[in-house]
Image (spheres, helix red, strand yellow):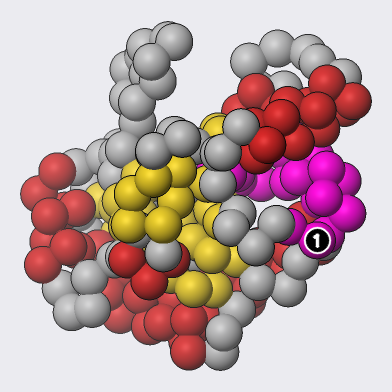
């Protein structure tokens, strides 16, 4: 398996295992089949597992937790996400922490390598587009993600790079910029309207 240097996360496999299939997003499967898929992927050299609470209502994270009984191989990196939307600024810290805590519990771990905001960043005056307004991101969300980083709960944070391009680019021009952007690609199926 080819690897790529992924900044502070170190080398990761050029291919990742997405959690949609093991979370039954693409159709029914058994837990046994999903656990076997994860173990086989890691045995074949896949070292980046991309998960989210929304992948089967936490099922993808539970599968990985079961596959390794909470003892991930040292080379394996986990990304997971938090869908935040546009909450009141005073609620952001608790929402991020609750999502991270629940993911860690399902994964049977205390740490996440890459924690991504799993919704669009939108202009502050966006009408009819759901997501996290840029001002809320800059003033509250980013500082809270940086706090989780400083506390050692995560190794890096980033954005799901869908949505309004100018708004995303503005977030990447800020300091500190997101560590990563997750772009929608799927070699087996079109990402549809995204």
Q: Which residue is mark 1?
A: 71
Q: Is 5 drawn above or below residue 112 in the view shown?
A: above
Q: Quadrant of residue 175?
A: bottom left
In this view, the residue in front, 115 or 75, is: 75
- Residue 57 is inside the magenta segment: yes
Taking the image as shown, residue 54 lies to the left or right of residue 178, namely right
Q: Is 170 drawn above or below residue 45 in the view shown?
A: below
**Residue lying at 19% horizontally and 63% vertically, measured from the top left:** 171
Q: Quadrant of residue 185?
A: top left
> What number of labels is visible?
1
Say if residue 111 shows up in the picture.
Answer: yes
Taking the image as shown, residue 25 lies to the left or right of residue 88, namely right
Give coordinates of residue 194: x percent, y percent. Answer: 32, 24
Give coordinates of residue 40: x percent, y percent. Answer: 71, 30
- For the residue labelled by badge 1, is the local secondary structure a helix, a strand or a loop? loop
Give coordinates of residue 99: x percent, y percent. Answer: 66, 62
Which region of the structure is painted magenta?
49-72
Q: Is 8 drawn above or below residue 78 in the view shown?
A: below
Say if residue 57 shows up in the picture.
Answer: no
Give coordinates of residue 186: x percent, y percent. Answer: 40, 20
- Residue 64 is inside the magenta segment: yes
Taking the image as shown, residue 129 lies to the left or right of residue 111, namely left
Q: Quadrant of residue 19?
A: top right
**Residue lying at 35% horizontally and 58% vertically, measured from the top left:** 6
How many residues crowd around disc 1 within 10 Å: few (fewer than 14), some, or many (20 or more)?
few
């Amino acid at each position: 398996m080819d690897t790529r240097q992924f900044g502070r996360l170190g080398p990761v496999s050029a291919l990742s295992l997405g959690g949609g299939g093991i979370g039954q997003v693409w159709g029914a499967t058994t837990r046994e089949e999903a656990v076997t898929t994860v173990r086989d992927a890691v045995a074949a050299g896949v070292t980046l597992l991309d998960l989210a609470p929304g992948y089967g209502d936490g099922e993808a994270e539970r599968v990985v937790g079961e596959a390794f009984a909470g003892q991930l191989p040292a080379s394996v990196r986990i990304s997971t996400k938090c869908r935040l939307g546009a909450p009141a600024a005073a609620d952001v810290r608790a929402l991020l922490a609750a999502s991270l805590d629940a993911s860690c519990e399902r994964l049977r771990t205390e740490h996440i390598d890459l924690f991504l905001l799993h919704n669009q960043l939108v202009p502050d005056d966006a009408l009819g587009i759901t997501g996290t307004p840029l001002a809320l991101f800059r003033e509250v969300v980013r500082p809270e993600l940086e706090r989780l980083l400083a506390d050692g709960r995560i190794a890096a944070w980033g954005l799901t790079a869908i949505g309004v391009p100018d708004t995303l680019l503005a977030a990447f021009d800020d300091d500190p910029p997101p560590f990563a952007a997750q772009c929608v690609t799927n070699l087996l199926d079109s990402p549809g309207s995204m």
